């Protein structure tokens, strides 16, 4: 057994002492990193929700502007397509109709500030249609 056996025994003892010294380090690192991971998850989910709400606002504004340009009530049409809690405004200036939809974003976390996204669309008044209706 000689020198080779002694060397293996020494390496084994060093490895065991290193493992014993680092015991519980994963738990400590997880406890320190978990809040940061949760914060990133909440921010990511809120960002995805904000993008989805913004797309819905742009769609509702487009529908409202087109309806008002055809002579239909644009605010009613925009409200039908808008997300919950949205505010729809339709303005007519000359031969253009501008529709704006603003909606709050539901944040994941009670203490986060409220976000509001908006979408805007412009349409030309169609010839031969009755006057634009906001």
Image: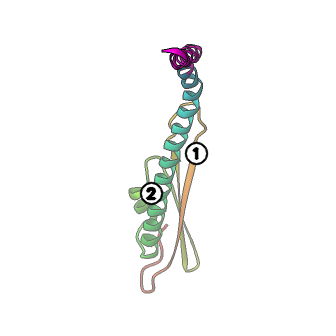
Mark 1 neighbour density, 10 Å: few (under 14) some (14–19) many (20 or more) = few
Q: Is residue 20 part of the magenta span, yes or no? A: yes
Q: CA distance from mark 1 to mark 2?
A: 15 Å
Q: Is residue 24 visible?
A: no
**Which residue is rendered at x = 54% and y = 34% of the image?**
37
Foreground residue among 119 and 19: 19
Q: From this viewpoint, which residue is outermost toward the bottom? A: 128
> Could you tell me residue 71's position as x and y percent?
42, 74
> Could you tell me residue 30's position as x and y percent?
54, 25
Q: Which mark is residue 115?
A: 1
Image: 24 above or below 103: above
Asked whether the residues under the numbered discs 1 and 2 touch, taking CB atoms below 8 Å apart as contact, a structural biologist would say no
Task: Give whichever of discs 1 and 2 has the lower sequence position.
Answer: 2
Image: 67 above or below 85: below
Q: Is residue 57 left or right of residue 25?
A: left
The image's colouring method is: rainbow
Q: Is residue 134 visible?
A: yes
> Could you tell me residue 40's position as x and y percent?
55, 38
Q: From this viewpoint, which residue is outermost toward the left? A: 80
Mark 2 neighbour density, 10 Å: few (under 14) some (14–19) many (20 or more) = many
In terms of secondary structure, what is the magenta stretch mainly?
helix
| Helix, strand or loop at mark 2 | helix
- Which stretch is magenta? 1-25
Image: 87 above or below 75: above
Foreground residue among 117 and 11: 11
**Which residue is rendered at x = 46% and y = 67% of the image?**
62
**Which residue is rendered at x = 54% and y = 28% of the image?**
34
Give the residue at mark 2: 56
| Helix, strand or loop at mark 1 | strand
């Amino acid at each position: 057994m000689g020198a080779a056996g002694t060397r293996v025994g020494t390496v084994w003892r060093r490895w065991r002492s290193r493992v014993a010294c680092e015991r519980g380090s994963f738990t400590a690192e997880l406890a320190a990193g978990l809040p940061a991971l949760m914060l990133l998850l909440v921010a990511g989910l809120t960002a995805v929700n904000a993008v989805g709400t913004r797309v819905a606002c742009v769609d509702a504004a487009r529908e409202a502007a087109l309806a008002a340009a055809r002579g239909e009530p644009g605010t009613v049409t925009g409200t039908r397509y808008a997300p919950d809690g949205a505010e729809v405004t339709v303005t007519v200036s000359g031969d253009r109709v501008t529709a704006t939809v603003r909606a709050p974003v539901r944040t994941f976390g009670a203490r986060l500030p409220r976000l509001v996204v908006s979408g805007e669309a412009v349409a030309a008044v169609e010839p031969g249609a009755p006057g634009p209706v906001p």
